[in-house]
Image: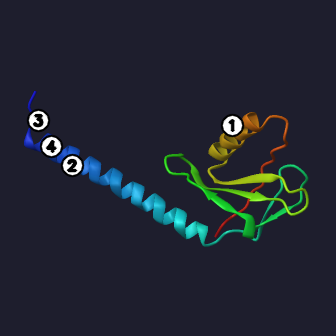
Amino acid sequence: MKKSKSQKRAQKQKQAKKTLATKQHEINRKKKVLKLPDFITCNECGGRAPNSTFEVLNTKGLDGIDLALTGICSECNSATIAISGDPEAASAMMAAFSEEMGEGKIGLEAVKLS
């Protein structure tokens, strides 16, 4: 079935809108990366993972997740994770990490990155 001009135009507009949304997500993510906290609280011992140990995880395509970080605790040398975004989405992502990591403790800590 052949598409009409208006259908083709609508499809192009939809693709352009999706591309723009992806670019805007990356711009927002990069802005937030510039405003990282000084530390994140260790999920294992409650110590601190300094921002010099942070690795920013790719959150593209994760609805409701603005930023996800990993870091290394300076007290127990364990890897730890912090997630920023919609509380429900962050909680679901933390639950998924908790399942994958097994017995390790994962807590939720609210940090505003602005």
Q: Residues within 10 Å of mark 4 (few under 14, many from 20)?
A: few
- Relative to 47, residue 36 above or below: below
Q: Residue at x 83, y 53 (%)?
A: 78
Mark 3 vs mark 1: which is more N-terminal?
Answer: 3
The residue labelled by disc 4 is 8
Amino acid at pointer 3: Lys
Q: Locate residue 113 relative to residue 47 in the image: left or right.
A: left
Looking at the image, residue 81 sits to the left or right of residue 35; the answer is right
Q: CA distance from mark 4 to mark 3?
A: 6 Å
The residue that label 2 is drawn on is 12
Mark closer to the chain start, 4 or 3: 3
CB atoms of marks 4 and 3 within 8 Å: yes
Q: What kind of residue is marked 4? A: Lys
x, y percentage for residue 29? 53, 62
Residue at the extreme top: 1
Secondary element type, mark 3:
loop
Rendered image: mark on residue 96? 1
